[in-house]
């Protein structure tokens, strides 16, 4: 691996690191704004409401992940028409799906609140959040497609500005709606929906010069080509199933935390911000592995693929170690910033050690996710996630009755480790297949 490759990794990852910082910062602002209201039920309401959207929208994460991998391979193969078609196909799939979500909002809410065991006051606030934010669904799904496409064409500066506008507008509206207008939970939801709409318009504007540089054209027959649509749908279906398993794990985590009472639910919500900060930083290196690896696969260059993976993993390990150190030293101070409720703070500090350990385990599945996305190996990702979810649920069943909330956190850590192992086992075969 040469110096130039490491620089390329950071030219791709650097803007994503900056843009991704704004995502957990948004979550932290949501938590801080609501967490400083006088009762923990407000924080619990946002946590449960946001969890429902995490489940729904992460389920449609294939619009980012599938678009990124397919675009990267078309970009590596220098097929400008196909690069354009990748974005158009994502819109053809995502926009109708979003309107279906809006039309189905009532049964979705009924099912969600039947599954989640929360107190009546928390459930009422979560419902208020849900029925406001759902109207941003078309914009949210289109933003997924734009982000994946920007990464696929290795224009992470555009991805940076897109995410900064999305999350910057959201943060400003959070403060205006909640602190200024006193809209509490509904204000947080409205801020998110409006920010998504603004970001779509800005993202499309950013895409115009990229399209001009690429050349080519939007060819209807190519966009709707049966073989390409079938491949896209097969990949998206596998990624959808994989993502549903992942979101189910975190939804189950929130739901089980709710059974321990509002204070533990709120403390877990605070600590999940630690995981979100870590995840979005490591995602930047995963995106670098996806873009560089996918381009190498499109060009049929096995050595370039191997080098890209090694360089991405090297820097991801350094970043993960940095997060563990920061959480070890400054964890209680971060908790204090996120909640002004003494009981929630004290409870979060009791479980903070799990957040210190998590980055050094989670680093492996994060980077490997990027590797397999760039290779468009959706089936492998799906099967690995199903196995990991089964391990996680078994650990929850065994550990929670004995150790309570500590058992819940231990199961989550084991889940991350299982994800890394199940993907790592398949990596040598993937590398050998390139260029054959």
Image: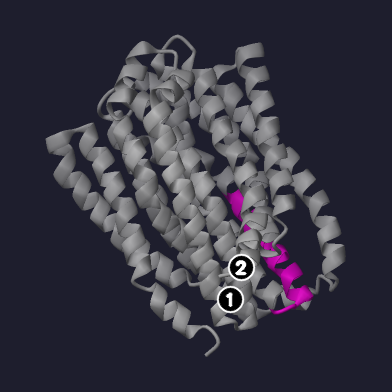
In front: label 2 or label 1: 1
Label 2 neighbour load within 10 Å: few <14, some 14-19, many 20+: many
Residue at 48%, 20% in the rendered image = 337
Q: Which residue is mark 2?
A: 292
Task: Give left or right: position of 97 versus 125.
Answer: right
In what element is the residue under mark 1?
helix
Residue at 49%, 14% in the rendered image = 36
**Closer to us: 313 or 388:** 313
Q: Is residue 30 above or below residue 240?
A: above
**Quarter occupied by the N terminus:** bottom right
Residue at 35%, 30% in the rendered image = 268
Mark 2 vs mark 1, CA separation in Å: 8 Å
**Residue 140 in picture, x, y percent from top left:** 63, 45
Q: Which residue is mark 1?
A: 304
Q: Is residue 414 above or below residue 78?
A: above
Prevailing secondary structure class for the magenta stretch in the rendered image:
helix
The quadrant where residue 232 appears: bottom right
**Residue 82 in picture, x, y percent from top left:** 73, 74
In what element is the residue under mark 2?
helix
Residue 64 seen by the camera: yes
Pointers 2 and 1 in contact (CB under 8 A)? Answer: yes
Residue range corresponding to the magenta coloring: 77-100
**Closer to us: 433 or 199:** 433
The quadrant where residue 55 appears: top left
2 or 1: tag closer to the N-terminus? 2
């Amino acid at each position: 691996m040469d110096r130039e490759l490491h620089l390329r990794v950071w030219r791709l990852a650097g803007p994503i690191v900056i843009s991704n910082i704004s995502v957990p910062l948004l979550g932290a602002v949501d938590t801080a704004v609501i967490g400083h209201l006088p009762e923990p039920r407000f924080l619990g309401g946002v946590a449960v409401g946001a969890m429902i959207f995490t489940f729904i929208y992460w389920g449609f994460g294939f619009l980012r992940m599938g678009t990124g991998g397919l675009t990267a391979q078309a970009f590596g193969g220098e097929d400008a028409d196909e690069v354009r078609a990748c974005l158009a196909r994502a819109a053809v799939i995502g926009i109708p799906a979003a309107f279906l979500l809006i039309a189905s909002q009532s049964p979705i809410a009924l099912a969600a609140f039947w599954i989640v065991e929360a107190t009546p006051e928390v459930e009422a606030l979560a419902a208020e959040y849900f029925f406001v934010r759902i109207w941003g669904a078309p914009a949210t799904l289109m933003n997924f497609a734009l982000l994946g496409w920007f990464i696929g064409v290795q224009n992470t500066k555009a991805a940076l500005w897109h995410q900064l506008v999305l999350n910057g507008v959201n943060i400003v509206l959070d403060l205006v709606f909640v602190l200024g207008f006193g809209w509490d939970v509904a204000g947080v939801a409205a801020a998110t929906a409006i920010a998504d709409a603004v970001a779509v318009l800005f993202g499309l504007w950013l895409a115009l010069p990229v399209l001009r540089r690429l050349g080519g054209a939007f060819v209807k027959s190519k966009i709707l080509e049966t073989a390409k649509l079938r491949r896209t749908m097969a990949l998206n279906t596998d990624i959808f199933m994989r993502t549903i398993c992942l979101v189910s794990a975190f939804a189950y985590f929130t739901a089980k935390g709710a059974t321990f009472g509002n204070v533990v639910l709120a403390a877990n919500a605070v600590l999940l911000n630690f995981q979100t900060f870590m995840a979005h930083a490591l995602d930047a290196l995963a995106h670098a592995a996806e873009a560089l690896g996918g381009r190498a696969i499109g060009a049929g260059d096995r050595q370039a693929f191997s080098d890209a993976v090694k360089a991405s993993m090297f820097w991801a390990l350094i970043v993960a170690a940095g997060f563990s150190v920061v959480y070890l030293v400054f964890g209680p101070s971060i908790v204090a910033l996120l909640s002004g409720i003494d009981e929630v703070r004290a409870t979060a500090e009791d479980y903070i050690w799990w957040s210190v350990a998590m980055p050094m385990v989670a680093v492996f599945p994060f980077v490997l996710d990027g590797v397999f996305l760039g290779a468009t190996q959706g089936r492998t990702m799906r099967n690995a996630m199903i196995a990991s979810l089964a391990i996680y649920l078994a650990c929850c069943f065994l550990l929670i009755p004995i150790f309570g909330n500590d058992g819940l956190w231990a199961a989550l850590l084991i889940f991350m480790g299982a994800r890394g192992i199940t993907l790592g086992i398949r990596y040598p075969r993937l590398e050998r297949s390139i260029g054959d």
